[in-house]
């Protein structure tokens, strides 16, 4: 974020009436924009033939390694408490050897960015998180490492210091607001003081070190933005640290988790996103991958349907490599099924649906060229894949039954 855009951004997010105006108009604007976006995707009409070569894992893909799916909050806008109460979700923490295997495979295909956030869960729950971070950055050579946390455990064992010192690139804080009563109602736990103190210490230590880490505080707010901005806790513990690398934002609308979250589950200033218009084109989030704590690999780490072992799981890294899994028939069947109107149960009512379009495809192509050029400059040989084979012809067959 450059200085001018930072100035404009922080002007909005430190002025109560301006923030209220911007975020109140953002809700209808985003709904209208999604309708235009879907129309554009339909008119672009990217075919399965065009898409096939971008189906698999590569250095430009988004890779998330979910170190744990256990959380210490019970947010009203999240599926986690419902999945745990129903016992559909089985929690766990990723062993270090498995983490190393995943990172090594990712680096071997040219990947250099990872996110440690699972679909649900808080990475700080993982007692071995710092060892994993150190391995990824210092030994495997990961250039960008980020994760999202609710901040409740930042103070434990001076974790806020150790994260900054370990070289984490970006930390995203998911929290409700700066009012204890509202926080406890939205996040379902009595850890407001722990969160606020931890976030303040993180911001302070990051500044003392010259701001090596980008930090974004993402308010999942039931309060109006102006109520947060004018609160004493915001003014004291957060606002003084805003810079080109430290920012905050508010939530204009909340996802429905494929229909699991209902209108009656949210309250105050919280609004659910409108149900998406159905377009028979794959969602762009299908081209990201997330590895569960036990090695299970899922397409799309955004949401799940009752459990993270749902119909989006396409393999396990302890049985096959990441590349093999991303190229297997199950992965492609999910993607191409969208063309025939077939969607996994997880995707049926998902309000995060974002169809691919021509601009997305051009960006994919440009990213691949840029990566190839960078690798060539480093003297690293590129491996290609032939796509005009009988198997390719077979894979592209889109069944309509």
Image: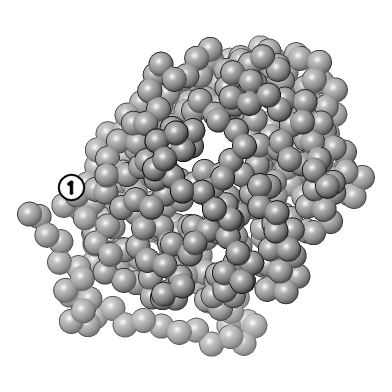
Q: Position of residue 6 (x, y in %)?
A: 73, 36
Q: Position of residue 193 (x, y in %)?
A: 77, 25
Residue at (24, 66) in percent of width and height? 49
Residue 326 image point, x, y percent: 38, 68
Tell me the residue at 77%/31% (across/down).
194
From the viewer's perspective, tell me whether residue 336 is left or right of residue 384. left
Residue 321 lies in quadrant: bottom left
What residue sits 83% from the left and 47% below the top?
157
Q: Nearer the viewer, residue 238 or 84?
A: 84
Looking at the rendered image, the quarter that the N terminus falls into is top right
Q: How many numbered markers are drawn? A: 1
Residue 129 screen position, x and y as percent: 69, 56
**Residue occupying the far right of the picture:** 208
Please give the name of the residue rendered at 28% of the width and 64% of the height, measured from the top-left corner.
330
Q: Secondary structure at mark 1?
A: loop
Q: How is the image coloured?
A: one colour
Q: Nearer the viewer, residue 83 or 176?
A: 83
Residue 317 in view: yes
| Residue carrying label 1 | 341
In the image, taking residue 339 as reference, residue 354 lies left or right, namely: right
Q: Tell me the quadrant of the picture where the C terminus can be found.
A: bottom left
Q: Nearer the viewer, residue 316 or 361?
A: 316
């Amino acid at each position: 974020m450059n200085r001018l855009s930072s100035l404009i951004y922080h002007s909005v997010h430190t002025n109560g009436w301006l923030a209220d105006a911007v975020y109140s108009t953002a809700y209808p604007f985003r709904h209208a924009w999604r309708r235009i976006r879907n129309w554009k995707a339909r008119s672009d009409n990217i075919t399965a033939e065009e898409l096939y070569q971008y189906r698999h894992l590569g250095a430009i893909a988004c890779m998330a390694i979910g170190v744990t799916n256990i959380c210490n909050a019970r947010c009203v806008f999240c599926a986690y408490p419902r999945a745990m109460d129903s016992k559909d979700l089985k929690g766990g923490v990723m062993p270090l050897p498995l983490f190393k295997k995943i990172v090594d495979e990712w680096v071997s295909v040219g990947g250099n960015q990872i996110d440690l956030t699972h679909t649900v869960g808080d990475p700080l729950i993982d007692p071995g998180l710092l060892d994993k971070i150190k391995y990824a950055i210092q030994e495997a050579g990961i250039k960008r490492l980020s994760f999202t946390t609710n901040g409740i455990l930042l103070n434990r064992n001076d974790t806020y210091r150790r994260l900054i010192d370990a070289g984490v690139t970006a930390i995203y804080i998911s929290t409700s607001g700066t009012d204890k009563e509202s926080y406890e109602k939205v996040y379902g736990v009595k850890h407001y003081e722990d969160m606020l103190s931890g976030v303040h210490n993180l911001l302070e230590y990051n500044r003392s070190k010259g701001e090596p880490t980008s930090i974004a505080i993402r308010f999942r707010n039931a309060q109006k933005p102006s109520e947060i901005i004018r609160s004493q806790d915001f003014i004291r513990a957060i606002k003084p640290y805003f810079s080109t690398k430290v920012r905050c934002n508010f939530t204009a609308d909340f996802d429905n988790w494929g229909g699991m979250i209902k209108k009656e589950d949210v309250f105050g200033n919280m609004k659910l996103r409108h149900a998406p218009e159905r377009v028979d084109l794959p969602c762009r989030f299908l081209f990201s991958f997330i590895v569960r704590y036990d090695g299970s690999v899922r397409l799309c780490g955004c949401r799940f349907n009752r459990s993270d072992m749902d119909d989006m799981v396409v393999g396990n890294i302890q049985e096959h490599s990441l590349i093999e899994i991303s190229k297997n028939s199950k992965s492609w069947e999910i993607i191409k099924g969208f063309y025939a109107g077939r969607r996994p149960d997880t995707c049926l009512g998902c309000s995060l649906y974002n169809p691919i379009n021509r601009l997305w495809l051009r960006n994919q192509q440009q990213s691949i060229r840029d990566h190839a050029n960078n690798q060539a400059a480093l003297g690293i040989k590129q491996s290609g894949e032939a796509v005009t084979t009988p198997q390719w012809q077979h894979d592209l067959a889109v069944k309509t039954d």
